[in-house]
Each structure stands twice: as structure tokens, then as C-alpha cells.
Amino acid sequence: MKNNQKREAQPTPNSVSAIRDIIFGEQMVDYDSRFADLEKALTAEISRVEKKLDKGIADITALLNKKNDSLAEGKVDRIQLANMLQKVVDSL
């Protein structure tokens, strides 16, 4: 009989889950709801930050392209100036 009593006294995994659900069920539902709200807020914030980063990257790319074009124009002017100076030197 002692063996039967020991077996009955040991809770099964299903009974432990059932007891946990009875004791903490309402709190777990509250936690699940709070975590879902937090996940939505974090997802929205991540999306907002990603959009800001994409805009910032686009702005920086445009600025770099503009600077690159400006430098390229400056090089052409310098080349033209060098050619003109060479002509002046040759004529002297």
C-alpha cells in the first residue's frame, strides 16, 4: 500500500500545470496582455526609427553626391585653368 500512496502523492506534470493555471491564470493573462502591448509599442518604435534612419541615409547620400559633383566640377575648372596656364607659359 505504501507504493500506491507514494504514486498518488506525486503530482503528474498535467496536474501541476492545472494547479498553476488555477493559481496564476488571471495574472498570466494580464502578463500576456501587457507583453503583447509592449511588443506592439516596440515594433512601432522600431519602425519609426528605421524610417528615420532610411531618411537620414538618403539625406547623407544626396549630400555626398552633391559634394562629389561639386568636386568633379572643381576638377574640370582646375584642368581648364592648368591648360590655360600652360598656353600662357608656351606663349612666353
Image (cartoon, grey):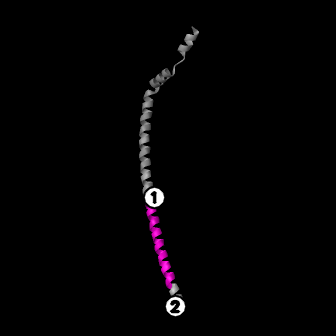
Give the amino acid type for the residue marked by disc 1 in the picture.
Ile
Q: CA distance from mark 2 to mark 1?
A: 51 Å
Say left or right for 85 vs 40. right
Q: Nearer the viewer, residue 13 or 78?
A: 78
Quarter of image, res 59: bottom left
> Residue 31: x and y, percent?
45, 34
15 or 68: which is nearer to us?
A: 68
> Looking at the image, is mark 2 or mark 1 earlier in the sequence?
1
Residue 9: x and y in percent read: 54, 15
- Which residue is denoted by mark 1 in the rendering? 57
- The question of residue 58 being in magenta is answered with yes
Q: Is residue 3 left or right of residue 21?
A: right
Q: Position of residue 22 (x, y in %)?
A: 45, 23
Tell me the crowding category of disc 1: few under 14, some 14 to 19, or many 20 or more residues within 10 angstroms, Cα based: few
Q: Quadrant of the N terminus?
A: top right
Q: Secondary structure at mark 2?
A: helix
Q: Amino acid at mark 2?
A: Ser
Which stretch appears magenta? 56-84
Q: Which numbered disc covers residue 91?
A: 2
